[in-house]
Image: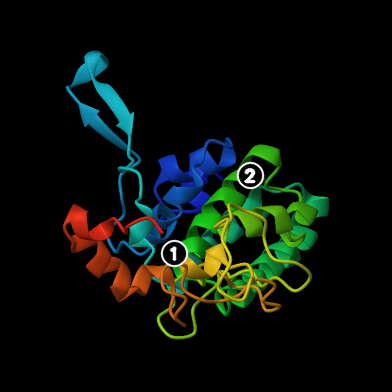
Amino acid sequence: MLLSIQDMFPAIDTAVVQSIYTNKFRAENLLKVEASFTYKKKRPQFYSFGTGESSLKIATTSKDIELEEYESISHLMRPFIVYMAIIVTFAPPPQKLPLAFALISYQHTLYDLLRTHTWDSLRKFHVVFHQKRICLGMYEPAGWSTRDHGLETAQLFKRNATDGTRERPPKRQYTSSPPRGPTTNRSNSSGDEICNNFNKETCNWQGRRYTHVCATCEGTHPATKCTQKRKTETMPLCQRISPRQ
């Protein structure tokens, strides 16, 4: 005896299950599976408008789910377990068991990634990965169990140890030679070239090929913090011009 979709999953919206079976399901709508599955009251398969032969029947469905509605990993895993049961049921017999193990492996991958990456980036990664599996073959076990490192690099952000935000990459440290760029075209009283990047507070080179002194007064501070420069700029023009020697 063949069972209908409604008979196999009586507590889930028939339109949602049918979209999964026909490969038209959208990954971001995964919460629909869990939400409809937990309803105590059985949802109708169709809403009817009018009576008789002219009546119109529309399959029940709801609006698309927003990513923000997946507030934590548990909000994602609960409907995903139901989704797993649905696609394993519809999978070809030889692939049912390997597919089930592959889906469990993917669950463990998500939990492992969450230990080092932000939840916001992880749920976005899952939606892209899930939609990719829908397009390329949701019944392929290898597709679920194989790590997509390119997608992980593109979508995931490292978790900051303090507040869970994206971790900023460290500043580049120069060890062989200083970065090339515009120079000050001047030397200090000893004849040493003055570091232009130091005066802009952007020098990260550890070797110090150029002298770290102020380009204005040759003090130990950068030119951006030079008080003598500020005094000179506020002087009347007649006082700024020095007499010729």
Q: Quadrant for the N terminus, please.
A: top right
Using the numbered discs, state the Cα–Cα distance from disc 1 to disc 2 in whole angstroms. 19 Å
| Quadrant in which the C terminus is drawn | bottom left
As drawn, the label of residue 120 is 1
Report x, y in % for residue 23.
Answer: 58, 37
The residue identified by callout 2 is: 132
Secondary structure category for the residue under label 2: helix
Q: Residue at x 61, y 76 (%)?
A: 190
Question: Furthest-right residue in view?
Answer: 94
Q: Amino acid at mark 2?
A: Lys
Q: Nearer the viewer, residue 207 or 117?
A: 207
Seen as rendered, the residue at the extreme bottom is 162
Q: Residues within 10 Å of mark 2 (few under 14, many from 20)?
A: some
Locate residue 92 relative to residue 189 in the image: left or right: right
- From this view, report whether residue 91 is shown above or below residue 204: above
Which of these two is toward me, 197 or 26? 197
SS label for mark 1: helix
Q: Nearer the viewer, mark 1 or mark 2?
A: 1
Instruction: Kindly identify the amino acid type of the residue bearing the numbered disc 1.
Output: Asp
Which quadrant would residue 50 be assigned to in this image?
Answer: top left
